[in-house]
Structures are given as C-alpha cells and as structure tokens.
Image: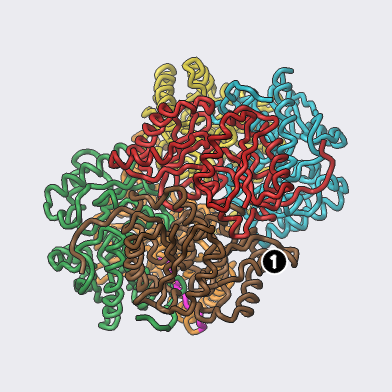
Chain colours: A yellow, B orange, C green, D brown, E red, F cyan
Amino acid sequence: MKIRVIAPIILTTFNADILREVEQFTAPDVEVDVVNLSSGPASIESRLDDALATIDIMEKVKQSENEGFDGVFIDCFGDPGVDASRELVRIPVVGAFQPSVLTACLISGSFSIVTILQGLIPLVRENLRKLGVEGHVASIRSIETPVLELTDHEELQKRALSQVLKAIEDDGAEACVLGCTGMLGIASELAKKLREMGQSIPVIDPTAAAVGHLELLIRGGLSQSTVTYAEPPVKERK
Amino acid sequence: MKIRVIAPIILTTFNADILREVEQFTAPDVEVDVVNLSSGPASIESRLDDALATIDIMEKVKQSENEGFDGVFIDCFGDPGVDASRELVRIPVVGAFQPSVLTACLISGSFSIVTILQGLIPLVRENLRKLGVEGHVASIRSIETPVLELTDHEELQKRALSQVLKAIEDDGAEACVLGCTGMLGIASELAKKLREMGQSIPVIDPTAAAVGHLELLIRGGLSQSTVTYAEPPVKERK
Amino acid sequence: MKIRVIAPIILTTFNADILREVEQFTAPDVEVDVVNLSSGPASIESRLDDALATIDIMEKVKQSENEGFDGVFIDCFGDPGVDASRELVRIPVVGAFQPSVLTACLISGSFSIVTILQGLIPLVRENLRKLGVEGHVASIRSIETPVLELTDHEELQKRALSQVLKAIEDDGAEACVLGCTGMLGIASELAKKLREMGQSIPVIDPTAAAVGHLELLIRGGLSQSTVTYAEPPVKERK
Amino acid sequence: MKIRVIAPIILTTFNADILREVEQFTAPDVEVDVVNLSSGPASIESRLDDALATIDIMEKVKQSENEGFDGVFIDCFGDPGVDASRELVRIPVVGAFQPSVLTACLISGSFSIVTILQGLIPLVRENLRKLGVEGHVASIRSIETPVLELTDHEELQKRALSQVLKAIEDDGAEACVLGCTGMLGIASELAKKLREMGQSIPVIDPTAAAVGHLELLIRGGLSQSTVTYAEPPVKERK
Amino acid sequence: MKIRVIAPIILTTFNADILREVEQFTAPDVEVDVVNLSSGPASIESRLDDALATIDIMEKVKQSENEGFDGVFIDCFGDPGVDASRELVRIPVVGAFQPSVLTACLISGSFSIVTILQGLIPLVRENLRKLGVEGHVASIRSIETPVLELTDHEELQKRALSQVLKAIEDDGAEACVLGCTGMLGIASELAKKLREMGQSIPVIDPTAAAVGHLELLIRGGLSQSTVTYAEPPVKERK
Amino acid sequence: MKIRVIAPIILTTFNADILREVEQFTAPDVEVDVVNLSSGPASIESRLDDALATIDIMEKVKQSENEGFDGVFIDCFGDPGVDASRELVRIPVVGAFQPSVLTACLISGSFSIVTILQGLIPLVRENLRKLGVEGHVASIRSIETPVLELTDHEELQKRALSQVLKAIEDDGAEACVLGCTGMLGIASELAKKLREMGQSIPVIDPTAAAVGHLELLIRGGLSQSTVTYAEPPVKERK
C-alpha cells in the first residue's frame, strides 16, 4: 500500500519530521511519501491560506492518483482542499480534522480541541458544524503559537499541557484532540504527563487518526462517495 | 451608497441581466456596478469551480474596497470566496446563499431550496449545516439544468414550477428559495403562477435577499465580525 | 415605500426618539410613521405584557394594511403580536428579535444577546429555540435595567459595555445583539468604544436589522408565508 | 385535590363531555371543575384565536388560584395562555400539548401527531421546536376537520384511523398523539382497532396526559419554575 | 391499582424508606410493593452494575406482570434494565431518569441534574442524548458521595444544597433534578431552603416523577410502544 | 499486534467465516483470534439478547486483556457490552456500530443503514442518538431476514441490493452501511453491482470499519477515555 502525504505548504523544513510522525502510526506494509506545494502559503492559519493552498493541493492529489498511490493524506488540521480534491479522484483523500474528531467521538463522550491560534477557533467550529458533531465538543482552546514557532518543543509541550489541563478541569473534557498537525511528537508525552498528574485522558495525535482512517478506507476498498463528491462537469476553466 | 457585484465567472454574457436583476431590488440611492473574474470557471457547479474562482474573487473584493465601494455581493448561490474574502476587507461581503436562506427563516417555518443540479445538493446541505439552519429545510430539489443552459427562460420557468409544486405537495414546503442566482427574473412569475394555482408560497429570489442584506449591513454600519473572520497573519505566500 | 412602526406600548414618550432611530437606517424613498397602542402595557417585560399588547397590535396592523402601508415593524425585541398579526394581513410584518438574530447569524459564527432584565432571558431563549438558531448563541446577558429606566443614556451605555465585554471575554462572543429596542442610539457608540479598547465586534442595533429586513421584503415583493401563517377560519369570536 | 379545567372557548356545549373525559383519567381523590371563557373565540384554530383567548384565560387562572384550586388544566392542544398564566400564579398550570408530547417521548422513540387542520401544522411544529423535541416526531398529520365539526363521532374515528395508519406505514410512527383535545373519547377505540388490524401502537389522549402530569406535579409538591416564568414587574397596564 | 417497585440492588436496607418515599407521592387507590434483586450489585454506580442488575430485573419485571401488577417502577436514576424489560411485558415499565427529566422539561426551560459521583456524569449525558433533550440541560453536577454513604441525611442535604446553588448561580439552572433515587426525602427540604435564601427553583424528586408518570400511563390505558420495544424473536438462549 | 474478536453468541458455526472476513481487512502484522460466548443468545436481535450476552462479553473482554491481546472487537452491529466492557479494561474495545457509522460520516454527507429486521430499527436509532450523528442518516431500512437465515448468500445479496437501491432513489443515500456483521462477504459485491447499474455509492462492511478503527487506536497508542468509561467502584456484587 502506498500513501502520499501532502504537506500543504511551500516549506520543506518539516518533511523529515512529518515522515517520522506518519511512519510511527502506519502498518508494516505501508509505503509513505511526503511532498510539498509548489505554490501556496508558508503555513495554513486562515481561510486565505486555505484558499491559496487548495489550488496546488488539487493538482498534487490528481498527480498522486496518476502515480498509483492508494490514498492521500493532506497533512493539516484545517482540511484544506480535502473536499475539492475528493471530486477529482477515485482514491480516498483525508485531511487531519475529520479523522481526529471522529476518533474522539469513538473513544469519549465529550472532548476538547487544543489548536494554535485564537483566530482559528471560528474555523474549527465551522468544520465541526459541517461535520455535525458540535454537540460532542467541550471546548476549543488555543496555545497562541503560530505554526512556524511550534519548533520549540519544550515550550509547545508546556503550553499544550496547560490548555489540556484547563480543558479537563474547567470544561469537563474527557479526551483531547491536538488541533494542528504541526504539534509533532507531543501527544504521547502529554498523555504520559497527564497520567502522572492523575488526570489521564486520551490525547489524539491528528496524524495518527488521519493515517489510521486512510488505511481503514484502503483496506476496506472504500473511498469518498461519488454522490457527495460528484465529478465536476466539463466546461471552460482558465 | 456604492455596491460592487462580482459575477464570479469568466463569462460576461450575463452582466446586463445581472445588473437589471440587482437594480430591481435596490433603493434609489444605491449605485451598482458588475465585474467578472479575470480567471476562473465559466460557471460554478462544483467545489473545484468554487476553489478556482475564489483566488480571483479575493483579489476583486480587495480592489472593491480600495476603489471605495461600500459593500460587495458575490453573485452566486454557492457563496464562493465569501468566507475567505471577509478576512481581507472591512466592508461587508455577502454571497447569495446565506442571505436567502436567512430570509426564508424569517418568513416561513419550513422551506425548500430548488437548485440546478443533483450534484449540488450535497454542497447546499453542507452550507446549511455550516449555517446551522438545516432543521428548517423541507427539501432540496433540482431542476437538472446546468447554469449555461438556464437561458431558455420558458423551459427554466416550467421546470422550476414543477419542482416547487412537488416541494409544496410532497415535502410540505411553506416557502421556496431559488438555489441559483442564474435563475434570473423568474421568482415573481413563479409566485404569481402559484397564486393562480391556489398554492401560494413566497418564492425568494436569491439576488433580492443578498442585495437587501447588503444594504441592511451598510445602512446599519455593520460588517462581518473581525473575530469570526480574523485578518490573516503576515507571512510568506507565493 | 411607506413603513408603519408600532411602538407596542401605551406611552408616547419615546416616539420622537424611535422615529429618529428608524429614519437613520432607512433608504431615502422610505416614509416612516410611528403609532402607539390605545390599550396595553407601559412596556413589555413579561409574557403578560406580550399578551396584553397583542390584542391592540393586531388591530393596529390591520389598520396599517387598510391605510396602504407597505409593511409594519412592531418595535420590540420580544416580537409581541408578530406571529398573530401575520395571519391577518398580506403586507410583511416584522418584530426586532428575528431580524437582529438572523443578521447576527449572517456576520458572525457565535454571538451574545444583551437584554435588559434577568427575567427576560428565558423568553429570549424560547424565541431562539422557536427560530432554531440556539446553537449560534454564546450567551444571553442582562444589564438589569427596566425599559422605563433606560433613559439615563450614560448609565445605559456603561452597563451595556460592561456586559458586552464579559460576553467577549468569558463567553467568546464574536458579535453582539442589543436585546431591547429601547436601547436607543447606543449601538454605534458601543462599537466605537470596543474598537478603541481593541475588542472590536459588531454591535447590532435591533432597529437597524428590523427596518433593513422589512425593506428587503418589500423591495423583493416578499411577505410572510400564507401557509406558515394561514388566515384564521371565520367563526364566532367575542 | 381540586383541579380546575379551563375550556378556553366561549361555547359551553362540550363541558359535560370534557368533564367525563377528564374524570376518566383522574385518581379517586381528585375533584374536577370545568369553566369556560367569558370572552374569546368559539374554538382555537389559529394564533388569532390563541391571542384572543389568552386574555380571559389569564383571568380565569388567577381566579382558580384564589378559589383554592391546586392546579389548572387549560384544555387545548395549542397550549393557549399556558406560558403567560404561569407567570401569574404559584399553582401548576398545564395545557395539553406539552404533557402529551412528553408522554410520547417516554413510551416511544418516534411518534406522529394527528391534528385537525392543515393550517395548524406550523403551530404544532413551532411548539415542538420551543419544547426542543422536534427530533422525535415522525410526522404531523391532519384529519381536515374543524373543531366544531368533531361531533360526528363515527366520521372522526374513521378519519383519525386513516391518518394514524398512514403515520405508521409511511412515516414509521411508533406511537401517536391526538393533536386536539376536542377528539373526545376516541383514543382507546382507535388503539383497539389498531390492535385488531395488527398495527398496534399507543394512542395518546391529550387529556389523559395533561391530567396525569398535573396530578404528578401536585402530588410531588412541584410547579412551574419561577425563574423560567418570572412574576411580571409592577407597572401601568390599561 | 397495584404498582411494583423494584429496588435494583441486593440490599434490603432501604426498602422501608423507599416504600415511604413512594407512598408519599401516590394516589389513595394505589397499592405499592417493593422487591429487591436476588442477584446483582449492592448499588448501581457504573455500566457494570447496570449490566449485572439487568438480568434479574428482567426476571422480576416478568414476575410482576404474571402476579397481576399494573405497572413497574425500576427505582434507579440510571434506568437499568428499563429498555430491555419493556420488550418482555405489556404493562408499563418506568425508571427514574426519563420521568424526572421530562418533568423538568415541562416546568422549566433549562435545568441542572445533581448526581452522586463524577464518574456517573458521562452516563447521565448518554441517557440525555438518547432521550434527545440534552439542549435543555444547564449542567450536570455531582455531590461526590457513593450510594451507600447517602444515609447521613444532614451531610447529603448540605452537599446537595451547595451544588444546587452553584447550578443556579454559575449555570443558570431554572429547575433541578436530583440525580439519584437514593437521595431520599430531601427534595422538599431543599426547595424550602432555596425559597428562604431567595433562590427558589423547583427541586424534582425522581421518585415523585417516576410514580406520577407510571400512574399517568396506567390511568390512560397506555404502555410502552410494542414497535419501539418489539417482543424478542424466539430462539436458543442459554 | 494481537486482536481478539468476540462473536457475542453461543453458536460457533460462523467462526471460520468471521475470521476470513476480519483477516481480509487487517494489516500483515495483525494476529486475529475468534472466540464465542459460553452463555448467551444464539444471535443478537433485541435488547434482551444484548443484556444476556453482555454478562459473558465482559468476562471475555477481561480475559482478552489478561491474555495479552492489544484490543478487542465485539463482532455485532448492536455494540452489545461495548460500553460496559470499556469500564473494565485499559485495552481498546470496539463494536461494529460506532466504527461503521463514523466511517460513513467521513466519506459521505448523508447515508443509510440497511439492517436485518424491522424490530431493530428503533435500537439503531437509539444508538445513533447516543452517538449524536442522527442528522447524517438518510434512512434505516431492513431486509427482514433473521441473523440465522443470513446464510443463503444469494438471497441476502438480492434483498440487500433492493433496499440499498431504495435508499439511493427514495431517501437520497450517498453511502450505505450494512447494519449487521452477519452480512458476511457481500459489501464488495454489492458495491460492484451498484457501479454496474450506474448507482455507485460506497457500501461499508461493518467488520472493515471496526477492525480498521481498532488498528488505528492500537497504533496510535489510544484507548477509550477512562473519564467517559470510569473504573467501577469496588463493592459487593453477587
């Protein structure tokens, strides 16, 4: 099985880390490949970034199908270009948002999402409404750290822990979803720390959920519905 | 008051009709201006079209603000680029979907949407969920006619009437929203015909609702929330 | 276009202020006229007041249609008599609640309502449920000031600001609806103050939203559905 | 225990039947008393009727408390005046709508309401939304018979049976609520007939549900919340 | 009328108190009888306890029908075995959860539930979702006291009062449901204390609501729907 | 990775088929093992069956953890014993219902469930409500075939196809979930047939979804929340 990961940004800096993160959650028969965008934003933190990235994401998803990949993971919690790409190919396409939120619904009754910026909360809520599971969400919290500053691992860890604890104590969170795929490699550490503090709840790494759902679809011979995501009519587009 | 209408397609064929349609619903002190896209699709009938159009829509919306317009109407029932553009300007931006659906909520308890293609029904439903008013919708129906074939006025009229009648009789529709801004100039005729048939319900022309809401916002000194639609952070985008 | 404003109370004290407030939001071709109730309460702050006012409101709405008005605005956030009056006439009838809440849905993803008395919160929530948009409401707050004490403009301003700030900080409000049409002339000042404090969100004056929706309906040739608001059967009523 | 039944109409024709219907469902220690309105409509079939009836209902409810009754049943499926009256007294006040719908929620997962006129369906749906249980309703159907023609017992029976069967077969109803308290004495016959036809579902007589809930509240020392139904502020009302 | 109360635990210690509690809320013509489980848990505080109790509850419910009882009350706020037992008999079966929550919906617009243990909150929320009334709940709070320690009446009273006050002040509760049938005999005292403190809201004793609903069903000739709770097919079970 | 499949019935007849079905969807590093119940029903088609099976399921789940399995799949669309077992172990436990419904939410906007018996529809709907995704369901349909008669592969295929086609045409289903894990080996054939008929929608085999989610949880180091599924307090249980 061959999976293509599209890091929907123009920076290649994170590719090695992304590959490591993804491979940690894949079965032994899964080959993974990471590509970036040729044009688009340096990170995705607004609807503007989403729109800019979507154009090249669609291109890259079509290429992935042509090159024989079995499925595509668009590696961002905002699910940029996911819906549009699904119209263009028959192989399954997933982002990080839907898989991680659905996983949270599976293992808890009420969960929080910890994202990176206050300004993204309305976007997360919009996506929750579109998916119809807003009623399961205890809170959406932010660590106030832009994507490109997530590299200070220790600081990231600290801020995320602080927000998860507030989600548990103030909002009644019974599980937590990390709301940015750039929060690389901290889910298991966070979970461990929470256990030690006697506040154990599952911490869902969005990459784990995304890759797991993609494998599930491929092994089950499944893909997005061609009724929900109908092939676009042929016409002039320039 | 100066309103810019963006017909989010590359064809200029409909501009005169659009202008006539819009001016029919504006107050005497409103100046209207219609522009098209420089690049994008010939019509919007898929998420692909929406994504392609959004890039130039954002540009045109920014220009409109720079040129001193008081508000922008993106003239399409799919609300393409509406959310993204709202992040970029302080003047109000509306599409046709949200205003017409909210108008239907104001004047009826349960309404149907009659759109142009079966394949658009999932998109309309997604937008309803995002807006949170799915519970008010009796049905979403289609006349199975692509945008570029809407020009046969009589045929359009006939097909729309047939679907509206089914919506009333089979689905219990108490009002009807025309689900494509390309259904120009038929709302009042339809309403009249329904009255004559003893099946009178309001037929909402999406252009009327959009322009009315835009005027309302401008006269009320209102615009989209800068919290819901936060200004995108500065960063590299190519 | 001629619009009738019904101030659904027996006091005429506010009429000049109401007229000024309304005219500030109307297009140049709109003639406005304000009338009061012959019998009813001094202000509307309970279901009792609503019931008492409704009888004469229905009368006044019917008169308005007979006198050739194009639409009626029942000037109260509780929408007293709106539903009942809609059964009796073919011209559009709006209150202040539905238009302002729907406007808030258009320009924000989550908003708060600031009303005047704690005891009105359950009524506002009931109306939200009836309209089906309860999921969009961050909170309903009160300034604890009866209608007839709203005349101390400065105190009103101060209390409203304090509640709006709490709505933003504690409840995550992304827009705010003033939940009483007696809060005359403070929306724009409040919005300005919030901007200066770096907490800018839209503040919706319910009068602006109501008048705008009424114009929209009239210019669009629309009115309440005669299916939703069916004409009452003829029978003995004494 | 003394219960006052208010038949919220000016006709006294049905009082004996109403008394018989109510007493059939009360415990041996319950004294029942039926009164009519001095002014109001001949029957309640619109929001207009509801508004007209409410004025005298409020008066009669206050009297009931003064005369020492333990609770009041406003005998109509539209719950006219229920909310307003609850503000005025400390004894429990129920209509027929809320108790019968809540009873249907208790004994089934999805139920239909069979009311008397097409034009009442939007009112029933509004009340369902206000109560928040719209999701449990399979359908709202009508037998198209005005209140004052419900006296032909056999015809009523036949029409109701026909609609209940459609509710079961077409809408998946698992229980049925009779949506008018004027459908006197047919619930048990209907249930029997359905059993004989191998289509047994519970048929809820709204009077049974209303009286049962009222007894429940009185024996439990309970009444409507004085927070939800706050006492109206003192002021001028004429 | 003969009602069987099943205390779904193996301890008989509470039976006299339960009988007193139940009889306080029944009509004079109601005979009450309390039985315990032969096998099961000492109290019900988890899904494990629920599952263990259900086996014998089903047996006891069938016996009750065979012995000629008119209805069964399974005396626990978790509604253990209620759904399964309803498949096995034609007499009505109620637990304490559904009746008390529906009663709260009848007399208030937003209410809180005060249960005994933090660990039960997810179970209560699950039951609210299943019943479809989650939107009416202001909060679910816990007094952190296991069932078998509820016997210290004064301490119980104190802790419950403290949580109810928080529900009122912090969560906006307009009524309160005691979320454990083991909280015997404190509802009316709590209500009285709240009144004295100027914070009066209804306090619903789950036993009162359960018994009242059971009487309502029996007097109304009603029982659970045999479509919702279909008779299990005959087959091998060992 | 070692996965235990619990076929929650006393018959061993299906074990070989179950094993084949499961292994078809697992990664190469997954070892699978199937066990049956020592006591319980021959099949699960009612709440009674669910309750009877749950006792031994809990035992078998605990054993699985003790024997070093990494996760458990309770192989039934009714999710019997899933919630109760989750309280008892730290390894992840899944049934077939939640995983397949969440998968349908991932790949479609509106889906139907095709189950085996009319009498199970209320149970499926209850589980949908508990999971909070009822709004995504176009319909629940039944092929009217008891579990133990599902062995006639051709007949099963035919009946399922007929219901799926109705779901597509009458209910607007955009994907389909097979609502019984006993519908072994027909999903891919059904999907193929639908494609040939020009009615292609995804057909979700509940086993594929269940196993995929279980792998996802195990590889992601995740399990059910110990807050949502708290460990039962220690006490007497007999």
Image height check: is C196 above or below E144?
below
Q: Position of residue D43 (x, y in %)?
A: 44, 76
Rendered location of residue B217, percent (x, y): 29, 58
**Magenta stretch containing residue E213, yes or no?**
no
Observer-nearest of E88 and F154: E88
Q: Is residue B48 left or right of residue C165?
A: right
SS class, disc 1: helix
Residue A147: name its quadrant: top left
x and y percent of residue F172 in the render?
Answer: 64, 58
Secondary structure mainly formed by the magenta segment = loop
Q: How many marks?
A: 1
Magenta stretch in the rendered image: B197-207
Q: Quadrant of residue D177?
A: bottom right
Confirm whether residue B124 shows in the render: no
Residue in the foreground of this view, choosing between E73 and B121: E73
Residue under the image location 84 percent in, 47 percent down: F150
Q: Quadrant of residue A232?
A: bottom right
- Quadrant occupied by the C terminus of chain D: bottom left
What amino acid type is highlighted by mark number 1? Lys
Q: Which residue is mark 1?
A: D192
Q: Is residue B203 magenta?
A: yes
Looking at this view, name the residue that lies furthest to the top. A196
